[in-house]
Amino acid sequence: MIRAVIFDWGGTLTPWHDIDLVAQWQAYVDVYRPEDTELAQRLMAAETRLWRDQQATNGEAGTGSLDHIWASAGVDTDSPLHLEAMATYLRAWDPHTVADPLAHPTLAALRDRGLMIGVLSNTMWPRDHHQRVFDRDQLLPLIDAAVYSSEIPVAKPHLDAFRSVLDLLEVRPSEAVFVGDRPWDDIHGAQQVGMRAIWIPHSRLGDQAVDVDVSPDAVAATLADTVSIVDAWMVADSLDGSWVQRGEVSN
């Protein structure tokens, strides 16, 4: 029986955007220390190292947080300009974080079916920023639980990342569906913990892609297709009594 649907954030609830990371970091530098012509590059390099470590360890290393990036790049977080610069940096992402127009009706339709909604995101950003983004897009009231890798030791596809949001929702893996755009982080990770996984194959991952042999349980052409896929699974589960999964890992 399905009780919850858990979504990835970037590339899933928000459309994929190709981003110039150095330009994004320059928004921080322009406030914090505009005379340092190399700081944006150092910040981008520190961020890239964290993402690569996360990939190389199958999520065991985690993504870290912005604090790890500041420390690696030699930023003085006690500087009176730091908080203003960080706010400017995060605001610079606003055009790239707008929710898919189908996100609200999709989450609302699933909630109307009595299902809980979760979010599990690999991110270095703080919770309060994600909440601001979700509130801006009127999604926050529809989300029952959210877990961000910036707050936990591991990241997707590590099993403990998925367990963390399952525990908050108080559901077993067999009672939850995961929806994501990344075959390795999202689909492989969710299936390894015992969840069904829906792939939305719209993101241009490029060098972020990890080569993995994985077959999603379903493919959604749009975010809204999640609803009909879950509906079909719920009907099938009610007819045969339960979903026979590939092997649920103890939660």
Image (cartoon, rainbow, N blue to C red):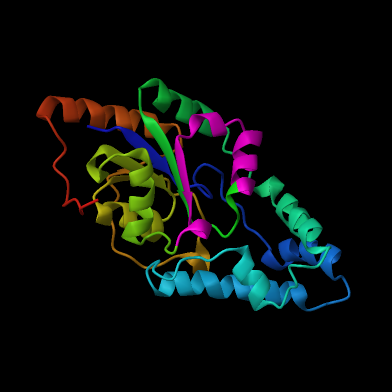
In front of the other: 218 or 243: 243
Q: Is 136 drawn above or below residue 129 in the view shown? A: above
Residue 102 in view here:
no
Instruction: Give residue 15's position: percent from left, percent from top.
Output: 56, 45
In front of the other: 36 or 154: 154
In which image quadrant can residue 189 be found?
bottom left
Q: Is 238 drawn above or below residue 180 in the view shown? A: above
Which residue is the extreme one toward the top? 112
Which range is magenta? Answer: 128-152
Q: Quadrant of the N terminus?
A: top left
The kind of secondary structure the magenta stretch mainly shows is: helix
Q: Is residue 183 left or right of residue 174?
A: right
The structure residue drawn at horizontal position 35% and vertical position 62%, both measured from the top left corner, is 158
The structure residue drawn at horizontal position 79% and vertical position 60%, both measured from the top left corner, is 85
Which residue is the extreme one toward the right? 35
Instruction: Give residue 145's position: percent from left, percent from top.
Output: 45, 40
Q: Is residue 132 magenta?
A: yes
In front of the other: 120 or 217: 120
